[in-house]
């Protein structure tokens, strides 16, 4: 009988799992993660019917994931450690990316009481992913949800996880902080474009965290990857600034985010701007343009704990202005709104019931994008370990 080939990623995962108990005895190694499952309802504008199904990856407030961390104290206040983390779909058990064993985080880090430096695959600062999320550090999204119509990361500058990254942060829970991030793109891009023409991203963040007030700024710069065959122009660099913060009134809390970007080539983390431009008649305008889109984004959210209950709401607005080639385009500007309600019930310190609903509506240029024109609802359960 001929046996089917087994995925290298599955073999690696099995091997990693088998050595965990032995590794844990030899060093400070821990396994952690989150399992989330539930039902969702989603109806886009113009559709005759909505979709109902079991929530998959990216359809729960926090993505299901598992990870391994390890840390060793070297003496004299120095330490070294690692973090490996992968996302998966609870409904099927499938890894989110078949060609990556650890798609969310893969980093080696070192530090002391003052500073920590990491290298590997790391998320940028303007999303809710560990280890260096400024959104989480400053409590910028009280809904604590990455679901459609709820997450500010779907509107601001957000590249998500990046390969070949180096990042640092100052350590300490309270007071002034500084963070920095740089990535020279993925290994495949470096092979395709050459180092000087592949995607480069830089972020710098600074701010203050206190018991009640938290406030900060994130600056971003990105150079899009560029083919050197001369058939398309080089796209101009993206620059932007985020100003964000929160205030805790001893129970109720509020947060706000403002983003101003120039020459953005995506809105949030979704690479759908090309389809957006095509949707209003610009068939090759995205590819042929040197200038991108100017974005202005505002987001506010509130949270209110009441015993085991937590109630929250969010409201966001985005103004988009396409500055590139506009040949045959019916619209070059657009506005979108999103409003959401989110509820959590804490069954324990690690287990929560959740439910939420959001409504998004875009006009003109943003009327062609499903994620800005939909109703989304969900209910489910999530457990941390």
Image (cartoon, grey):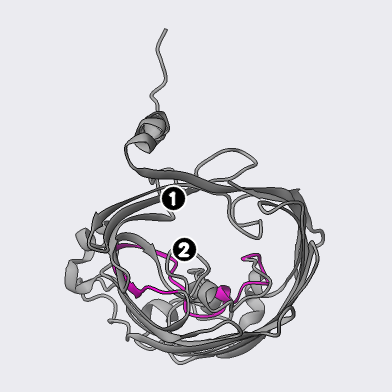
Residue 303 horizontal/vertical position (percent): 73, 76
Q: Secondary structure at mark 2?
A: loop
Q: Which residue is mark 2?
A: 130
Task: Name the residue nearer the viewer: 97 or 16.
Answer: 16
- Magenta span includes 315: no
- Percent coordinates x, y for residue 102 in the rendering: 40, 48
**Circle 2 Cα neighbour tier, 10 Å, few/some/many (<14 / 14–19 / ≥20):** some
Q: Quadrant of the N terminus?
A: top left
Q: Callout 1: helix, strand or loop?
A: strand
The residue that mark 1 highlights is 85
How far, Cα to Cα, is label 1 from label 2?
A: 10 Å
Residue 282 coordinates in the image, percent (x, y):
50, 81
In the rendered image, the residue lying farthest to the top is 1
Left/right placement of residue 347 relative to residue 78 reads: right
* Residue at point 45%, 92% (across, down): 323
Category of crowding for the residue at label 1, using alpha-carbon neighbours closer than 10 angstroms: few (below 14), some (14–19), many (at least 20): many
Residue 10 lies, with reference to residue 5, above or below; the image says below
Q: Is residue 21 left or right of residue 228?
A: right
- Number of numbered discs visible in the structure rendering: 2
Give the x, y percent position of residue 45: 75, 71
In percent of the image, x 28 and y 81: which residue is there? 234
Q: Is residue 43 visible?
A: yes
Decide: is 92 above or below 182. Answer: above
- The reply to whether the C-beta atoms of the residues labelled 1 and 2 are less than 8 Å apart is yes
Q: Is residue 34 left or right of residue 271?
A: right
Residue 7 visible in the current orientation = no
Q: Observer-nearest residue: 122 or 8?
A: 122
Residue in front for this viewpoint, 25 or 300:
25
> Residue 287 falls in which quadrant of the image?
bottom left
Tell me which segment is drawn in magenta.
146-172
Q: Earlier in the sequence, mark 1 or mark 2?
A: 1
């Amino acid at each position: 009988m001929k046996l089917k080939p087994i995925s290298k990623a599955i073999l690696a995962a099995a091997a990693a799992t088998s050595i965990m108990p032995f590794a844990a005895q030899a060093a400070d190694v821990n396994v952690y993660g989150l399992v989330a499952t539930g039902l969702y309802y989603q109806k886009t504008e113009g559709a005759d019917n909505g979709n109902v199904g079991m929530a998959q990856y990216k359809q729960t407030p926090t993505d299901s994931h598992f990870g391994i961390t390890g840390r060793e104290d070297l003496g004299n206040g120095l330490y070294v450690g690692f973090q490996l983390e992968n996302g998966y779909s609870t409904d099927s058990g499938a890894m989110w990316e078949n060609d990556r064993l650890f798609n969310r985080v893969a980093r080696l880090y070192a530090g002391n009481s003052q500073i920590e430096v990491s290298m590997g695959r790391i998320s940028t600062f303007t999303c809710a992913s560990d280890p260096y999320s400024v959104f989480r550090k400053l409590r910028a999204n009280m809904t604590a949800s990455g679901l459609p119509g709820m997450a500010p990361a779907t509107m601001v500058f957000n590249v998500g996880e990046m390969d070949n990254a180096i990042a640092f942060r100052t350590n300490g829970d309270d007071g002034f902080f500084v963070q920095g991030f740089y990535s020279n793109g993925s290994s495949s891009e470096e092979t395709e474009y050459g180092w000087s023409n592949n995607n480069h991203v830089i972020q710098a963040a600074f701010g203050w965290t206190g018991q009640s007030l938290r406030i900060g700024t994130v600056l971003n710069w990105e150079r899009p990857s560029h083919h050197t065959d001369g058939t398309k122009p080089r796209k101009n660099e993206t620059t932007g600034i985020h100003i964000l913060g929160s205030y805790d009134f001893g129970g109720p809390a509020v947060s706000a985010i403002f983003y101003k970007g120039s020459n953005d080539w995506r809105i949030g983390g979704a690479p759908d701007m090309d389809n957006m431009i095509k949707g209003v008649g610009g068939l090759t305008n995205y590819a042929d343009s040197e200038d991108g889109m100017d974005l202005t984004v505002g987001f506010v959210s509130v949270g209110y704990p009441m015993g085991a209950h937590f109630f929250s709401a969010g409201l966001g607005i985005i103004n988009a202005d396409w500055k590139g080639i506009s040949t045959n385009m019916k619209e070059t500007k657009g506005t979108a709104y999103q409003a959401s309600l989110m509820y959590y019930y804490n069954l324990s310190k690690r287990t929560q019931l959740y439910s939420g609903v959001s409504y998004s509506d875009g006009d003109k240029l943003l009327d062609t994008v499903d994620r800005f024109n939909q109703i989304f609802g969900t209910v489910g359960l999530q457990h941390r370990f």
